[in-house]
Amino acid sequence: MGLLDGQVAIITGAGGGLGRAYSLLLAREGAAIVVNDMNADAAHGVVAEITAAGGRAVASIGDVASPSAGAAILQSALDAFGAVTILVNNAGILRDKSFANLSEAQWDAVIQVHLKGAFCVTQPVFRWMKENGRGGVIVNTASSSGLGGSFGQTNYGAAKAGLWGFSNCLALEGLKYGIRVWTLCPAAATPMTEGLMTPEMRAQWSPERVAPVLLYMVSGLSGDRTNRTLFASGSKVMEVKMVSGTPLPNHAGFSAQDIAAAADRLFLPDTPLDFNS
Ligand SMILES: NC(=O)c1ccc[n+]([C@@H]2O[C@H](COP(=O)([O-])OP(=O)(O)OC[C@H]3O[C@@H](n4cnc5c(N)ncnc54)[C@H](O)[C@@H]3O)[C@@H](O)[C@H]2O)c1
């Protein structure tokens, strides 16, 4: 018995890197997989790997960033497997540039794939899950660049922090339909991070070390937990969340000078998010 017997998962950008590792593990646990990628050879390759191992999968080729592609990806799941119960918004690209040198095209390309892509694929899937009453799990992919910051990635960081906000809101809308929504913040040696990690790090930070965290999120092992963010790398798994500091009561109205005088109490201690160790 697999953890995902009877489940159908759509995984975007699943032709390589993390998406491939997610697809192989979820298929091993019994889920039927819709392998989306804009790279047809890569998507068909992952489908072949899954079917060779005795699993079920189909490819759905296309760029996630259009409503028609989102509808087509859902249709692939319905045509092949009659349902969708899991969606992993994983497709992504980088166009790194320091902000002063960033072009509009580099800004648009990144926002388009990550943010608009998540909208275009999630909306038809969410509607289907809502109307069909079986509930489901949606996982959106953020990044330490969005949640903690990273030099030269204002476009990517904005998109990734945007996905975190998207998750927070969608989780609330999904509650009454039994649709759980997670944010996964991965770090792994993939084609995307080629040249950004030492060989030692690449050996340890395999996508296969992140995939079990995704499996936890989408399986019954996480119960009814929703609206949470986990960071997962080759060296650790940790929750990441927004916290508020101690409130200063504002009964009489603050001047800017009052805020300055209270700054020691207002700001939380500066404990940096540690994503790298
Ligand atoms: N690898 C990391 O350390 C890391 C860190 C933080 C976040 N992420 C995020 O994890 C996700 C997967 O990253 P990865 O490292 O496996 O990257 P990757 O480049 O290895 O794989 C991404 C896949 O997405 C596909 N893709 C790109 N644009 C697409 C589009 N418009 N439509 C459909 N498919 C598209 C690519 O063809 C590729 O197969 C991305 O969202 C990325 O931003 C990765």
Image: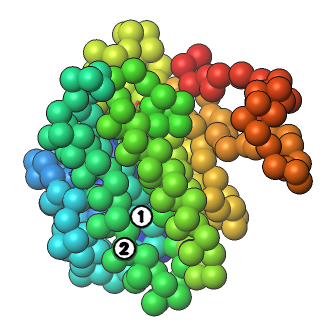
Q: Residue at x 56, y 25 (%)?
A: 275
Residue nearest the viewer, comparing 128 with 35: 128
User: Amino acid type of disc 1?
Assistant: Leu
**Neighbourhood count class around disc 1 (C-alpha, 10 Å): few under 14, some 14–19, many 20 upward:** many
Quarter of image, ligand 1 = top left
Residue 264 location (% of width, % of height): 83, 24
Residue at the image point whose x is 63% and y is 26% from the top:
273
Report if residue 83 is visible in the image: yes
Asked whether 239 or 51 is in front, the reply is 239
Left or right of 87, for residue 68: left
Q: Is mark 1 within 8 Å of ligand 1?
A: no
At a point 36% along the width and 50% down the height, the residue shown is 90
Quarter holding the N terminus is: bottom right
Labelled disc at residue 87: 1
The type of colouring in the image is: rainbow
Q: Nearer the viewer, mark 1 or mark 2?
A: 2
Q: Residue at x 47, y 19 (%)?
A: 204
* Label ID, residue 70: none
- The spot of residue 169 in percent (x, y) is 55, 65
Against 236, residue 18 (above or below) is below
Q: Circle 1 — which element?
A: strand
Query: Element type at marker 2?
Result: helix
Vertical arrangement, residue 22 with respect to residue 78, above or below:
above
Question: Residue 128, how many percent across, how many down?
Answer: 40, 83
**Distance between mark 1 and mark 2 Cα atoms:** 11 Å
Q: What's under tag 2, amino acid-wise?
A: Gln
Circle 2 is placed at which residue position?
Answer: 123
